[in-house]
């Protein structure tokens, strides 16, 4: 009953309780943003916006710049996307177009399970399997590095692309499909020319969702990325990401400026993920998905 | 204390009243209008529903008959952006009066819907008892008695007395609808509103419910919305014909179907439209 | 034409390959954990405390209890807030405020867990001048909120309006209708939502790193740092001791079994439900 002629105290109390908790949620988000901003002010006051593009991260000299971490985050996420997009989309197309329904459901479920695996377990397998494997290729003596982190991230974000894209593909109306088939297109040509373009908004949304996830991933990355605040041209070199430096150095932050610089990185991470997630929801909304 | 208004004075063209002056009135509307947002679905209907009779409301789809009936127990306003204006007199009291709690009204006027809607998590017994329980009745003996009475009134007792504790949804469609009727009757309403109660049912189930309506009107006043003219002719004592939100004609069923006064009524009855 | 048919075959062959690779990744992961974890799982693991650094043996009893305590606290915070928020969105929130709350819940969902840890740090660790289970539970609780909101709203909305109308028509007040008719009708879905929420949060490590920290002995009460399974896995994995690596695999196996049990179980009860997102 939307009309608020709630003469009844029961109705009023119940509604206010629900409203109260909802406002609490709003408050928590606002509080989070506020606390992040407030507790990083010293860093921005000391370094200004150049904090974002300064390369040095020197706790001893108290000179902090976030560039290595921003760089590392962007590069590892990019590598992850390069691997995960074809892999995830290919899987989604297989499940939506080729696989019989029961196989599609089962495999779809298995892919979802990949997303349920905790990050630290990915890191564990990364440390003991992937890092030695990368080392063994002989391309680099390190094993750890941006590439390794990117590969692990790719496996972690594939389910996001696959699950959402599969659903989006399944909701493409039959008429689109039939229109292509009717002019003599092969199945693949139907997918390529009729179905994928129709679903592109939702697929893009899934990619942004995956990206948002990759940007914030902490444990798996910090266990295989090398944790060195350096910028190299080669992705085979060790690096650092925003989330990883927070995980490693937070407890060791001596001094307010150090702490505020770290929280400043947290604020940047917060901002980027909100932006990317927001874009993702926008794209998914266009397809009528309420997610 | 509002005094009963003279129902025989026609303030608008679409007022109709039962011809016989001795006919008691259960509920009367005065210039009742209803909107969905800015879209007016019911336009100034004034009608007097006779007591202990079955009144059918007929009309083509979209004419506002469901909306109209839902205004009678203030269910219309449950929909977002919906509102109703006008007066509806029940026992000398306007149910739309400022400060009137719709919840109280709905306890006095029962409703059965187009699609049977038993509560999915409750047993047959719990379904019938739901209205009473949720209004505070706890006494086991009284509840059981009320449940049995409701089920008997709905002509369902014999069929379910062995399975009172099976889920309400395990019954057939027709049985579920009679369960909903039992549930509505268990709270002892003064009127029973039925919004196309048979449209989701097969002919045999429909026949059972029609028979039920015939018996119910001994104790209750029934208002029945139906798109099935034959049903209205079979079951009701009075019939009102609605067209595009307005009440075109109202009178004894026999007259409406054999000798309607309005040409539009005649056109509908003879199947020229609708 | 023949080349088009060929392209068709190749293209779909590639997609099948993608699917194979993806699923293989999962099986490889699970298999590797199983193989390495089984050997290290023993009674000690569940009952003993960690040995002093450098010594072999011992177990993760305190981590298991710690995880349980953290999840308990997280549920106490996250579930009520998320539940009532979800009820609001489903039953009352059809306007701008509803949009704002939904958006806020989405934002919370997308925040990296480590940032949630920062929030708990400044809110609880700093004023209390120390790490605690409380701070860790708070961080995890915050992470449970958006999932609980979305799940509650989704399952309450699945209850058809006809059920609500039936109750209103009987003259039942709205709050009773929601509490005694709508919520019971959605109960199965709501419970699966809670379980999935817990499973998701049970594996979180990052928010605990500087809130609940870690502990090599029992932690008492709620104001001491506490060990937890995920943090132990992390600590042991990056350390140089082989025995610790062994135990890390065992812990990973336990965690994985928990996650699999919940996700598989939920899938059996509600086949159409999606696990993540």
Image (cartoon, rainbow, N blue to C red):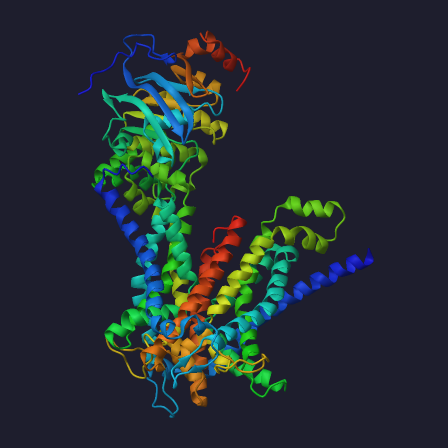
Q: Nearer the viewer, residue C49 or A184?
A: A184
- Foreground residue among B205 and B18: B18
Q: Up-down: is B116 above or below A192?
A: above
Q: Nearer the viewer, residue A261 or C263?
A: A261
Residue most toward the bottom?
A: C55
Q: Which image quadrant: the N terminus of chain C?
A: bottom right
x, y (%) of residue A71? 52, 74
Q: Quadrant of residue B195?
A: top left
Question: Is residue B128 placed above or below B56 in the rendered structure?
Answer: below
Most distant residue in the left direction: B1
Residue C246: x and y in percent read: 45, 85
Res A172 seen here: yes
Number of numbered callouts drawn: 0
Asked whether C256 or B246 is in front, the reply is: B246
Horizontal and vertical percent position of residue A149: 53, 76
The residue at 23%/37% (across/down) is A7
Residue A120 seen in this snapshot: no
In percent of width and height, residue B112 lies at 37, 30
Q: Vertical placement of C139 versus B169: above or below?
A: below
Is residue B205 found left or right of C25 in the rendered image?
left
């Amino acid at each position: 009953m939307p009309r608020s002629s709630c003469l009844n105290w029961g109705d009023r109390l119940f509604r206010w309780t629900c409203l109260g908790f909802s406002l609490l949620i709003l408050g928590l988000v606002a509080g989070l943003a506020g606390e992040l901003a407030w507790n990083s002010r010293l860093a921005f006051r000391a370094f200004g916006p150049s904090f974002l593009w300064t390369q040095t991260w020197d706790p001893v000299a108290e000179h902090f710049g976030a560039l290595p971490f921003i760089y590392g985050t962007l590069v590892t996420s990019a590598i992850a996307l390069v691997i995960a997009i074809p892999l995830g989309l290919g899987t989604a197309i297989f499940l939506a177009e080729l696989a019989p329904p029961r196989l599609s459901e089962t495999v779809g479920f298995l892919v979802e399970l990949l997303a349920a695996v905790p990050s630290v377990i990915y890191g564990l397998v990364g440390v003991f399997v992937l890092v030695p494997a990368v080392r063994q290729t002989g391309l680099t003596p390190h094993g750890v590095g941006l590439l390794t982190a990117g590969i692990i991230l790719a496996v972690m974000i594939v389910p996001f692309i696959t699950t959402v894209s599969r659903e989006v593909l399944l909701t493409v109306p039959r008429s689109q499909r039939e229109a292509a088939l009717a002019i003599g297109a092969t199945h693949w040509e139907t997918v390529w020319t009729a179905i994928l373009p129709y679903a592109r908004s939702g697929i893009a949304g899934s990619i942004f969702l995956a990206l948002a996830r990759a940007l914030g991933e902490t444990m798996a990355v910090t266990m295989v990325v090398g944790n060195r605040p350096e910028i190299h041209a080669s992705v085979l070199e060790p690096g650092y990401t925003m989330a990883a430096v927070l995980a490693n150095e937070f407890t060791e932050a001596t001094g307010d400026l150090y702490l505020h610089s770290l929280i400043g990185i947290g604020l940047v991470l917060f901002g980027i993920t909100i932006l990317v997630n927001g874009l993702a929801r926008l794209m998914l909304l266009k397809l009528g998905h309420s997610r | 204390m509002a005094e009963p208004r003279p129902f025989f004075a026609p303030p608008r063209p679409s007022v109709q009243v039962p011809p016989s002056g001795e006919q008691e009135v259960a509920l009367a509307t005065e210039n009742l209008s209803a909107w969905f947002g800015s879209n007016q679905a019911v336009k100034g209907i004034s009608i007097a529903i006779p007591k202990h009779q079955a009144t059918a409301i007929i009309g083509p789809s979209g004419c506002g008959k469901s909306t109209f009936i839902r205004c009678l127990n203030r269910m219309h306003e449950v929909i977002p952006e919906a509102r109703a204006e006008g007066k509806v007199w029940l026992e000398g009291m306007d149910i739309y009066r400022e400060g009137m709690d719709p919840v109280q009204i709905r306890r006095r006027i029962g409703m059965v819907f187009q699609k049977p809607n038993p509560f999915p998590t409750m047993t047959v017994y719990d379904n019938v008892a739901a209205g009473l329980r949720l209004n505070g009745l706890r006494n086991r003996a009284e509840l059981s008695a009320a449940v049995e009475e409701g089920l008997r009134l709905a002509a369902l007792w014999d069929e379910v007395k062995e399975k009172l504790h099976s889920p309400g949804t395990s019954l057939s469609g027709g049985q579920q609808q009679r369960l909903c009727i039992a549930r509505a009757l268990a709270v002892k309403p003064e009127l029973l509103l039925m919004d196309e109660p048979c449209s989701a049912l097969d002919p045999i189930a429909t026949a059972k419910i029609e028979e039920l309506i015939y018996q119910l009107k001994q104790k209750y006043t029934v208002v029945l919305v139906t798109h099935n003219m034959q049903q209205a002719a079979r079951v009701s004592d009075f019939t009102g014909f609605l067209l595009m939100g307005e009440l075109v004609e109202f009178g004894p069923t026999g007259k409406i179907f054999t000798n309607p006064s309005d040409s539009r009524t005649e056109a509908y009855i003879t199947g020229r439209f609708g | 034409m023949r080349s088009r048919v060929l392209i068709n075959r190749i293209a779909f062959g590639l997609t099948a390959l993608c699917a194979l690779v993806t699923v293989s990744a999962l099986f490889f992961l699970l298999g590797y954990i199983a193989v390495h974890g089984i050997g290290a799982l023993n009674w000690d693991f569940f009952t003993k405390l960690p040995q002093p650094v450098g010594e072999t043996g011992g177990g993760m009893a305190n981590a298991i209890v710690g995880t349980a305590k953290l999840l308990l606290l997280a549920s106490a915070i996250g579930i009520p807030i998320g539940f009532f928020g979800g009820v609001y969105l489903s039953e009352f929130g059809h306007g701008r405020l509803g949009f704002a709350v939904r958006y806020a819940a989405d934002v919370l969902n997308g925040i990296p867990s480590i940032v949630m840890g920062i929030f708990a740090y400044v809110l609880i660790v700093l004023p209390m001048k120390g790490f605690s289970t409380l701070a860790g539970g708070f961080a995890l609780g915050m992470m449970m909120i958006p999932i609980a909101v979305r799940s509650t709203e989704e399952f309450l909305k699945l209850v058809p309006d006809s059920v609500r109308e039936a109750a209103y028509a009987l003259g039942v007040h709205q709050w009773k209708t929601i509490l005694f008719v709508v919520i019971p009708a959605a109960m199965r879905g709501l419970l699966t939502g809670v379980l999935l929420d817990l499973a998701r949060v049970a594996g979180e490590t990052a928010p605990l790193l500087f809130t609940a920290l870690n502990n090599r002995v029992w932690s008492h009460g709620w104001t001491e740092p506490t060990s937890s399974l995920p943090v132990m896995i992390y600590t042991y994995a990056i350390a140089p001791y082989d025995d610790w690596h062994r135990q890390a695999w065992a812990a990973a196996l336990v965690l994985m079994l928990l996650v699999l049990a919940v996700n598989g179980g939920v899938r059996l009860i509600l086949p159409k439900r999606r696990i993540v997102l």
